[in-house]
């Protein structure tokens, strides 16, 4: 919870990937409060109040996962909302003449996004979600110490640059510093 709050403020992309990781961890511990407490809370030796707060946060997420029917797969609505907001911003950035570098980064990453979408059966997902799927897949491969071929590394690097730029614009917008309206 403490990490998620910091990531949410600093980098929305890292926050979303972290939250997907938390969803998977909770699934790995079978949405069991005691297993989560033993594996994800106790090792940190937090003061009792902080440990209870963290356990309650995990408990709330697990309950949402049950209610929303994502115990086995899928993402919580709070995480889907982040994707919706990022997609909305993405579309506005593409339409704005004020951010040509964003469009250039997008079009440079687009062939990799399309290729990933086709290989991963992600056709029913939006491009931004496909990007996050690719980045999450890369993280999983690294965590599992699996070999990452040069094509995958190059593709995810371009996608990562594009998503980093989107995350920066998202932060600017949240801080009220992003103006996409043309001056014409």
Image: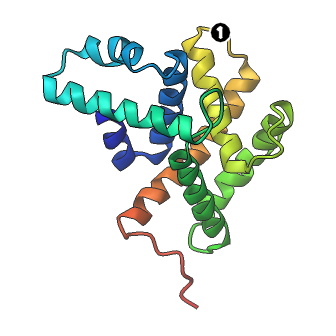
The percent position of residue 29, horizontal first and vertical second, equals 49, 16
Residue 12, visible in the rendered structure: yes
Mark 1 closeness class: few <14, some 14–19, many ≥20 residues within 10 Å: few
Identify the residue shown where x is 31% and y is 41%.
6
Q: Position of residue 77 (x, y in %)?
A: 56, 48
Q: Is residue 24 left or right of residue 109?
A: left
* Residue at 44% in and 70% down: 178
- The single residue placed furthest to the front in the displayed view is 67
Q: Which residue is mark 1?
A: 146
Give above or below for 124 relative to 154.
below
45 and 38: which is toward the camera:
38
The secondary element bearing badge 1 is classed as: loop
In the rendered structure, the answer to whether residue 142 lies left or right of residue 103 reads left
**Could one spot residue 165 in this view of the protein?**
no
Colour logic? rainbow
**Front-most of 165 and 138?**
138
Q: Position of residue 84 (x, y in %)?
A: 60, 57
- Give the percent coordinates (x, y) of residue 18: 47, 33
Tell how many labels: 1
* Residue that appears at 46% across and 35% down: 63
User: From the image, which quarter does the C terminus lie in?
Assistant: bottom right
The N terminus lies in quadrant: top left
Is 178 situated left or right of 79 in this image? left
């Amino acid at each position: 919870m403490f990490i998620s709050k910091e990531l949410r403020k600093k980098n929305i992309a890292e926050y979303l990937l972290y939250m997907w990781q938390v969803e998977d961890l909770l699934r790995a511990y079978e949405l069991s409060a005691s297993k989560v407490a033993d594996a994800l809370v106790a090792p940190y030796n937090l003061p009792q109040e902080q440990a209870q707060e963290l356990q309650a946060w995990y408990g709330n997420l697990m309950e949402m996962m049950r209610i929303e029917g994502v115990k086995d797969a899928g993402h919580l609505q709070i995480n889907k909302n982040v994707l919706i907001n990022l997609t909305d911003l993405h579309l506005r950035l593409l339409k704005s003449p004020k951010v040509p570098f964003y469009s250039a980064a997008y079009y440079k990453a687009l062939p990799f996004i399309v290729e990933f979408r086709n290989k991963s059966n992600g056709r029913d997902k939006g491009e931004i979600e496909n990007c996050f799927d690719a980045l999450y897949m890369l993280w999983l491969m690294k965590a599992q110490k699996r070999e990452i071929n040069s094509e995958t590394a190059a593709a995810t690097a371009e996608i990562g640059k594009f998503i980093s730029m989107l995350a920066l614009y998202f932060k600017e917008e949240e801080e009220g510093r992003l103006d996409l309206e043309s001056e014409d």
